């Protein structure tokens, strides 16, 4: 956790005690450190300073408007994967030329909206997508700048669900077909090919993976230029890993050292798309202990945050550090399962975890929750989604109010047929 420290056995976010946030805004609640986010962004920016570069924050990681605005003011560009994410950026007032639109399934409506907004680049992932974008752009009388997303067949990522660069994945154009497809796409009306893209996964801890991707993209760049094509940018994606438990977190300098010797001499703009690395450890999920229960030789700590609030432990079997907001050295450590209130056996935040002997009413902080936390939350079991709070120095601002019960049924209506179906 970055930006979170104990002061006299009380956990704070920057200059604000988390206990005060939990008391004021209730739990579950997400809390983010703005200073931590900006420091991480600055570290990546500094590491790449020797080459023309653009840091495009992956909006899917954490799409709260306050997070987007904070990074925009720091100079970030943005990587989006939906029309909804585009809408968020337009609400914040982002310069659309700083937006890259990725994703394998862009709809015609999303293409029209992005073209109308004037976004910087589309990352095109298949020939059918390129042909559709060509028709949409031509009909609108505009040209779409595109980067061809190539699947370099490089294994990466901490979980099979977040590995995107192997041959068996749905993402990108097969490496062996890239030259042929570029030639075809370059002849389509309404498209202006300008670069290559090679994102291969998430939670990557070995920076050598990025070197392998850069080498493949550099080889393709050389081949395309030899045929007279213009390559302005190379986008090597994101996915730089963070520490959740005992991982050795690569730093931006090591990342740069792996990539820059390969791409530096090509005279291109280097585009990177960090998401988790910027915000993951800058956020926690606050939760309150409801009950303790013993069954089957286990101790269960039942809390008010569940898999609908933070799905990563259930979906990926992910480890998130859990600590009390108030440390008490007199409490013995015990092994517990930290579970939520949902009617699912898979509703847990941690299993077999050693924690202080907490009691009902105690507050806990779940670390590493700034990435893929709230954005993956749901209303399962008809539970309102939690509040979000952004802290900067001594100021804590509620940047998303907790959903109300009325929010749960907004847009629904009570209707039933007048008579039973025969």
Image (spheres, rainbow, N blue to C red):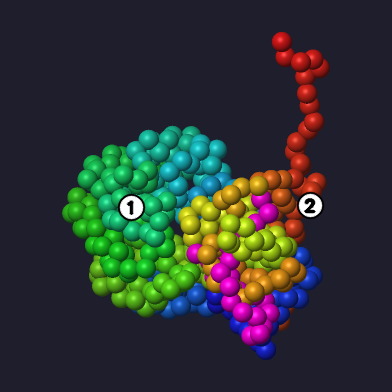
Where residue 44 sits, quadrant-wise, is bottom left
Classify residue 290 as left or right of residue 237. right
Point 66% across, 50% down: residue: 342
Q: Residues within 10 Å of mark 1 (few under 14, many from 20)?
A: many
Residue pushed farthest bottom?
8
Local SS, label 1? loop
Residue 240 position, x and y percent, is 41, 66
Sequence-wise, the earlier of marks 1 and 2 is 1
> Circle 2 sits in a helix, a strand or a loop, which is it?
loop
> Quick check: can you spot residue 393?
no
Give the residue drawn at x 62%, y 58%. Answer: 295
The residue range painted magenta reads 319-342
Viewer-proximal residue among 301 and 212: 301
333 in magenta: yes
306 on left or right of 209: right
In screen coordinates, is 320 left or right of 405?
A: left
Give the distance between the C-alpha atoms of the residues marked 1 and 2, in whole angstroms: 40 Å
Residue 9 appears in view: yes
Taking the magenta stretch, the answer to whether it contains residue 321 is yes
**Which residue position is annotated with label 1?**
165
From what the image shows, is residue 302 above or below residue 278? above
Pick whichever, 49 or 97, lies toward us: 49
Q: Circle 2 is placed at which residue position?
A: 404
Q: Is residue 415 above or below residue 376?
A: above
């Amino acid at each position: 956790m970055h930006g979170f420290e104990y002061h006299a056995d009380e956990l704070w976010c920057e200059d604000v005690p988390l206990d005060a946030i939990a008391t004021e805004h209730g739990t579950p609640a997400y809390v983010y450190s703005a200073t931590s986010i900006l420091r991480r962004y600055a570290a990546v920016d500094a590491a790449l300073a020797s080459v023309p570069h653009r840091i495009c924050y992956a909006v899917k990681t954490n799409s709260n408007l306050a997070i987007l605005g904070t990074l925009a003011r720091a100079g970030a560009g943005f990587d989006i994967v939906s029309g909804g994410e585009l809408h968020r950026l337009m609400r914040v007032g982002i310069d659309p030329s700083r937006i890259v639109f990725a994703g394998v399934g862009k709809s015609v409506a999303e293409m029209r909206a992005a073209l109308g907004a004037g976004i910087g680049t589309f990352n095109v992932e298949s020939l059918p997508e390129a042909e559709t974008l060509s028709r949409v752009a031509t009909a609108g009388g505009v040209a779409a700048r595109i980067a061809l997303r190539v699947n370099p067949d490089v294994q990466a990522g901490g979980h099979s669900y977040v590995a995107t660069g192997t041959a068996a994945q749905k993402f990108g154009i097969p490496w062996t077909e890239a030259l042929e497809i570029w030639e075809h796409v370059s002849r389509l009306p309404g498209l202006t090919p300008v670069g290559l893209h090679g994102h291969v996964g998430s939670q990557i801890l070995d920076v050598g993976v990025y070197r392998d991707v850069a080498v493949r993209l550099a080889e393709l760049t050389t081949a395309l230029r030899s045929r007279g094509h213009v390559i302005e940018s190379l986008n090597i994606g994101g996915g730089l890993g963070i520490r959740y438990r005992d991982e050795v977190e690569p730093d931006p300098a090591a990342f740069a050292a792996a990539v820059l010797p390969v791409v530096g001499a090509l005279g291109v703009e280097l585009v990177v798309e960090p998401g988790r690395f910027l915000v993951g450890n800058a956020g926690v999920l606050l939760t309150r202990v409801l009950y303790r229960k013993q069954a089957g030789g286990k101790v269960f700590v039942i809390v008010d945050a569940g898999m609908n609030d933070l799905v990563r432990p259930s979906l990926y079997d992910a480890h998130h550090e859990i600590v009390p907001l108030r440390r008490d050295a007199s409490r013995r450590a015990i092994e517990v399962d930290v579970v939520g209130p949902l009617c699912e056996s898979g509703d847990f935040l941690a299993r077999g975890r050693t924690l202080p002997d907490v009691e009902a009413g105690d507050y806990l902080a779940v670390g590493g929750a700034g990435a893929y936390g709230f954005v993956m939350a749901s209303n399962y079991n008809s539970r309102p989604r939690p509040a979000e709070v952004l802290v900067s120095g001594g100021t804590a601002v509620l940047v998303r109010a907790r959903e109300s019960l009325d929010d749960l049924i907004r847009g629904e209506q009570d209707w039933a047929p007048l008579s039973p179906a025969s």
